[in-house]
Amino acid sequence: MGNNHQYSELREKLIAGTKLAFQRLVEKAKVSDDYLVFSENGKIIKVKARSIK
């Protein structure tokens, strides 16, 4: 049980860190009035950073 708890805790920290990094990326792109590029079903999509909430 101890290992599962450690992995669960690590997983939660990784998810929180990823969310924080994405938030910072969006904020920086908003300041620079840039686009972010994503892939959706193999199609490339450019999104204006200011349109992301």
Image (cartoon, rainbow, N blue to C red):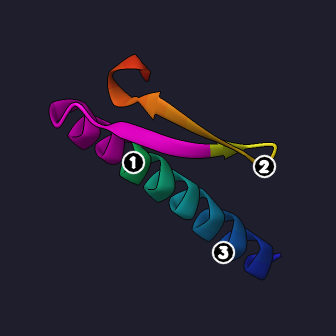
Choose between 11 and 51: the one closer to the eye.
51
**Circle 1 SS class:** helix
Q: Toward which corner of the image does residue 7 lie, by quadrant? A: bottom right
Q: Is residue 8 visible?
A: yes
The residue pinned by badge 2 equals 42
Residue at (51%, 35%) from the top-left corner? 46
User: Taking 45 as reference, is 5 above or below it?
Assistant: below
Q: CA distance from mark 2 to mark 1?
A: 25 Å
User: Taking 33 as reference, is 5 above or below it?
Assistant: below
Kind of residue indicated by mark 1: Leu
Left or right for 8, reference 41: left
- Checking the image for residue 5, the label placed there is none
**Circle 3 SS class:** helix
Left or right for 5, reference 48: right
The segment highlighted magenta reads 23-38
Q: Earlier in the sequence, mark 3 or mark 2?
A: 3
The residue pinned by badge 1 equals 20
The mark closer to the camera, 2 or 1, is 2
